[in-house]
Amino acid sequence: MELREVLGRRRSIRFVRPYKTVEPEKIQMMFEAARIASHWGNVQSLGAVAVHRESASQAVLDSLEATIVGWQIKVAPVVIVWYIDPEMVEEQSDRLRQLIDVGALGFGTKEERTSALEEQLIPVFSGIKENLKAPGLGEIDCGQGIAQATLMAYELGLGTCCLGSPFGERMFKAIGIPDHCRFLLLQTVGYPAEHWEAGGQRPRQEFGRLFKMNSYDQAYPRSDTVVEELKRDKMFTRPAPLPEREAELEYLQRAFDIEPPGLL
Ligand SMILES: Cc1cc2nc3c(=O)[nH]c(=O)nc-3n(C[C@H](O)[C@H](O)[C@H](O)COP(=O)(O)O)c2cc1C
């Protein structure tokens, strides 16, 4: 599948087949995609524990909880607990040295690059180290990693849904994630039980409201030709709501034995 089509298929899949195991190799592929994501200073602060329903301890499974539409956790064969380890920032100088070594940062001779790094860049980063550990830039990097893992999941025919949770501390304790880490997100993973369109492509804000050219009051021009090309390439698919969605939801509600409205 081409990237554009994967982007077009990426949507929150809340109904996954509880009986169909997700192969560890596929979760590995998601993690491999996350690992090569970009991170400031090549620090790599994103980490995750994949909880497999069929092999995890009952205590770990019981600890997984989200407040909004949390029932998905009880059916998904795999739940990924994503976290950020801000202490990775302690290794930033070595990560930067690696970038210099491989020619990914700066120019001139290796000696020139190395001395500029040691005398200029590392002191700058070291001076703001504690700020860099605080919530902010690191979370953006982690988001990039999670996005890459998510696209890989869809390319593999899986469906996922991200879930925020106020119960990070409890989950960390059960799983053994060090408490200096910050909880980011739960992500349910499984083979879709609903059609991949899941009711159609979800409504979005108007393009020009979000994206601008040169100044905030000038909407970025949106070419219909580009939109048509992306439709042809299946990045834009049938918009929600699809005519069959209500019947599909009724069917899924019965199959999953969920009390309506299923929002918690
Ligand atoms: C960071 C993040 C956190 C989310 N948290 C929740 C959540 O706690 N509960 C939930 O039901 N959906 C959650 N979602 C899913 C969104 O509600 C979903 O993306 C939205 O309905 C749009 O659907 P789409 O992902 O198919 O475009 C989350 C999504 C993201 C990216």
Image (tube, grey):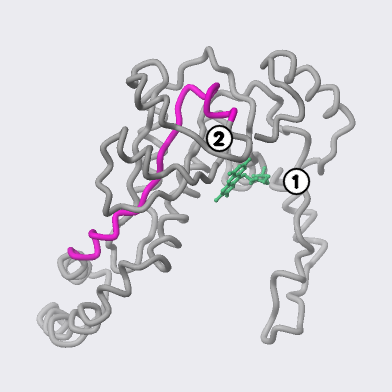
Quick check: which quadrant has ligand 1? top right
Give left or right: position of 131 versus 70. left
Place of residue 75 in the rendered image (x, y in percent of width and height, measured from the top left): 55, 21
Q: Is residue 79 magenta?
A: yes
Q: Residues within 10 Å of mark 1 (few under 14, many from 20)?
A: some
- At 78% from the left and 38% from the top, the residue drawn is 200
The quadrant where residue 260 appears: top right
Give left or right: position of 189 versus 260. left
Residue linked to disc 1: 202
Place of residue 131 in the rendered image (x, y in percent of width and height, measured from the top left): 32, 75
Q: Give the magenta part as a residue range.
A: 71-91
The quadrant where residue 108 appears: bottom left
Number of numbered discs: 2
- Does the residue at mark 1 contact the one at mark 2 (Cβ under 8 Å)? no
Q: Is residue 184 magenta?
A: no
Whichever of callouts 1 and 2 sits on the residue coming sooner in the sequence is 2
Amino acid residing under circle 2: Thr
- At 11% from the left and 84% from the top, the residue drawn is 115
The quadrant where residue 262 appears: top right
Residue linked to disc 2: 160
Q: Residues within 10 Å of mark 2 (few under 14, many from 20)?
A: many
Q: Secondary structure at mark 2?
A: strand
Up-down: is 232 above or below 257?
Answer: below
* C-alpha separation, residue under disc 1 versus residue under disc 2: 15 Å
